[in-house]
Amino acid sequence: MKQSKDSYVWILGGGQLQIPNILCAKQLGYKTIVTDQNKNCICKKKADLFFCVDIFDIQKNISLSKKLKKKYSIKSIFVGGIDCTVTQASLAKQLNLVSSGITCAKLTNNKYLFRKFLHKKNILNIPFMKVLKTSKGLIKKVENKIGYPFIIKNVDNSASRGIEIITKKIDGKQLDVYVASAIKASRCGYCIIEKYYHGKEYTVETLFDVKGNFHPCFITERYFNHSEGKALETGLRNPSTLKLKDQKKIFKFAEKVAKRIGIKVGPAKFDLMISDKKLIIIEMTTRLSGGFDCQYLVPAATGKNVIKAAMLTSLGKKFNKELLMNKFNKIGMTSSIWPKPGKIKKITFKKIKLSKNEYLKVFFTKKRNDLIHSYENCADRACFIIAASANEKKTNYLINKAKNNIKINTT
């Protein structure tokens, strides 16, 4: 087999959030390999090499890597905006490339194992329990161990799939329905129930460089609607309005937890909450954030290039600290519109003329003839609006103008 002279970055996932990863790799002078189970994914034509492989099927990816390494010089396995960190770590080990490691990936990819670790280390303990199946008497066990309010979660999936927030007393039959839904959304075959807290939520993005030095990247505010018992993200704001001293405390805490887990290189992304002045860890992962955060929102608001810093790290290289410095001092926000459920008949968006320092992008996740179901999780959103401007008022104006210019007609 003829050996290729080019060097490649292997990017896991072929969705919209992986396009910035492909562009970054090419800007750095690398060709790209993309794997995704969707043979018609948006990144297929943008990649130099594409293989239709499920990114969560570790063994198939490892088998592919054994074939590819005979012909191609693969320098990085990169993951951002998608929850396949165990695959990334497994491939990196197979190819002797940079990674936080399989142990760290497995621990943070599983909400139950992560809660168990935090409990063992006595880090901000909250009541929780593992649920393998629905069973008679389960409601009493939950009431006795956790109490109301509580939240039922998938264990190893994203976008709040299978989540149910219980604030009032329910019976066993209702609990069984919710538990079954959360187990169905989990790849591992079980779910987790834990104490529910209400407060302001944040994405905390951090990165360890190849020398093991910790770098705070950004904190983004996350806005949710919990009114119907679901965790529906309605928007983001970057930068956070938190005071600088509070941000430093959060970053210091994130560094401490990441090091306790054993992360020495690569991303450590946290979802945190401040509830009654208490810091709550919702979850964490060894990848870059999704939700259009580090891909579009943060670069538009601040000029930071977290993807480039993380990719250079994955290549075993140092990066310039300027990549993580605030250059723009804008206010960036995201939002969505919520069309009536049904079959999409038509989508239109009238483009908006922008001033020099304004930023606006609209991404549609649905197309004509797709179905819009009732909104159960964050992945059900039909579109994303991302805007940035000199201040919050102007950014809100752009978002509202975009909403008025979007029409998604359903039947």
Image (cartoon, helix red, strand yellow):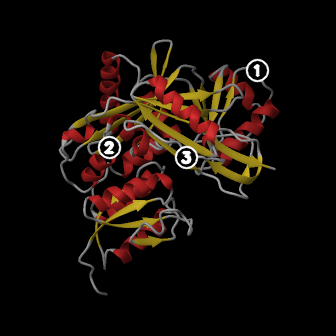
Percent x, y of residue 22 = 38, 59
N-term mark: 1 or 3: 1
Q: Which residue is mark 1?
A: 169
N-term mark: 2 or 1: 1
Percent x, y of residue 105 = 40, 47
Q: Is residue 222 visible?
A: no
Please tell me in which quadrant of the rendered image residue 321 appears.
Answer: top left
Q: Compute the Cα span from label 2 to label 1.
A: 44 Å
Percent x, y of residue 133 = 70, 43
Label ID, residue 351: 3
Is 36 placed above or below 16 here? below
Q: Is residue 243 visible?
A: yes
Callout 1 amino acid: Lys
In the image, is 370 to the left or to the right of 145? right
Which of 357 and 106 lies nearest the eye of the viewer?
357
Q: Compute the Cα span from label 1 to label 3.
A: 48 Å
Q: Compute the Cα span from label 3 to label 2.
A: 28 Å
- Disc 1 secondary structure class: loop
Task: Point out the frontmost of discs 3 and 2.
Answer: 3
In the image, is 294 to the left or to the right of 383? left
Q: Are marks 2 and 1 in contact (CB under 8 Å)?
A: no
Label ID, residue 306: 2
Identify the residue shown where x is 47% and y is 72%: 51
Callout 3 amino acid: Lys
Task: Point out the frontmost of discs 1 and 3.
Answer: 3
Q: Are marks 1 and 3 in contact (CB under 8 Å)?
A: no
Is 344 placed above or below 327 here? below
- Disc 2 secondary structure class: helix
N-term mark: 3 or 2: 2
Identify the residue shown where x is 26% and y is 38%: 324
Identify the residue shown where x is 42% and y is 44%: 296
Task: Point out the frontmost of discs 2 and 1.
Answer: 2
